Image: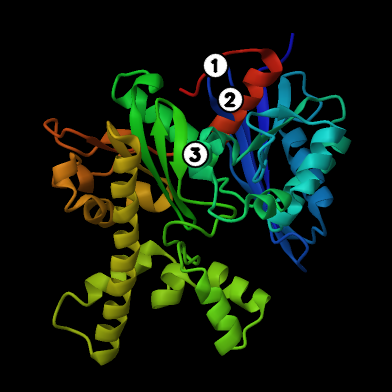
Amino acid sequence: MRGTRVLVLNSGSSSVKYQLLDMADHSRPAAGIVERIGERTSYLRHTPAGGTPREREEAVDGHGAALEAVAAELARDGLGLDSPELAAIGHRVVHGGRRFTAPTLVDDEVLAEIERLVPVAPLHNPANLAGIRTALGLAPGLPQVAVFDTAFHTTMPEYAARYAIDPAVADAHRVRRYGFHGTSHAYVSRRTAELLGREPSEVNVIVLHLGNGASASAVAGGRCVDTSMGLTPLEGLVMGTRSGDIDPAVVFHLARVAGMSVDEIDTLLNKRSGLLGLCGDNDMREVLRRMDSGAGDAGGAGDAESAASAKLAFDVYVHRLRKYIGAYFAVLGRVDAVAFTAGVGENAAPVRRAAVAGLEGLGPVVDPELNEARGGGPRLISPASARVAVAVVPTDEELEIATQTYALVTGATARPG
């Protein structure tokens, strides 16, 4: 009989995050991270359930060495990759293109297709591949499942996924809107329906995943019909370091007038824009602190200038967010809930308040006291009288990946609890 545990691996360009989940009770026997892979000194933190975290610094020269270190830490706690309780390994893969619409058992053909998608996800898919290949070598007899960030968004109708460019050019180079953060949007939209006491098939939800990366989705009856990110994670909302939506001609203008190369413009828009570009901070907590510091009479001209730039960044961020909320009301026709999630969405009450302010005519209303109150689980922050509920729903992408992985390898119909 197959075990009930799933090891979830998220292999980034210079890190490996992992969680071991038991699908029998959704407990987490272990979790950890290996950071700064390939640098002179790497950092590993492993936390067994109920135990003291183990931390150390050492040279980890690649993803192979990182996963070997992870396997060794798990084995120390009796949770090794050869454990009969381990049912599968679930891998986060950022880009699945049009082909991968659901979790997929990994084989040579799947690996080859993920590699063919590297040109549209050059920062992510290579690292995801490295993690999968290493895990296959460490546990060749264990089912390995790829769960794709883009899969949830493959239900978008063609008119929402297409860019208005020559279809022959678009198809030849895989240029279309794919969307990202799919596991988060899937999880949060479903949990929002549960919070309302209804089936996901009955509920239309606008999901706002607001972290350092940020995206919005319009989910109709459990199916994504539109999302803010496109060919890459650059499109859409203002983010920590990414610009979000921008006139494409800005790229041509910077090349012609500023003499910037394609790589320099890429770096500008992805790493030096967003909140960071506008005010010098990509952490919303710091942006809010700086805004508050300018609310009183104390402080000199420098403090006032800092507060003003932070306020402008906040206003630009919220204006874009409000535009997408309004647009998705139009896309869905009927909206039952607006759900905030991820680091900013779950913790920044001023962002939630400002994002909904002025939209009361459409139905969503935030209760000031409920909005300011902190809570660990899903909760409503709208008054009972609101025509459209506003919710805060902590995301759990690892649980979503584990659930999809376990369901695939066992034929189970388990849902995240």
Please tell me which residue is depicted at 38% across the width and 41% down the height of the picture.
207
Figure disc tally: 3
Circle 1: residue type: Ala
Residue under the image location 49 percent in, 24 percent down: 416
Which residue bears the numbered disc 3?
Answer: 184
State if disc 1 and disc 2 touch (CB < 8 Å). yes
Left or right relative to 342: residue 380? left
Q: Which residue is mark 1?
A: 414
Q: Secondary structure at mark 1?
A: loop
Q: Earlier in the sequence, mark 1 or mark 3?
A: 3
Residue at 17%, 74% (x, y): give it.
Answer: 295
- Residue 403 marker: 2
Q: Secondary structure at mark 2?
A: helix
Of badges 3 and 2, nearer the viewer stands: 3
**Image-based side of 404 in relation to 235, left or right:** right
Calculate the distance from the C-alpha at mark 2 to the C-alpha at mark 1.
7 Å
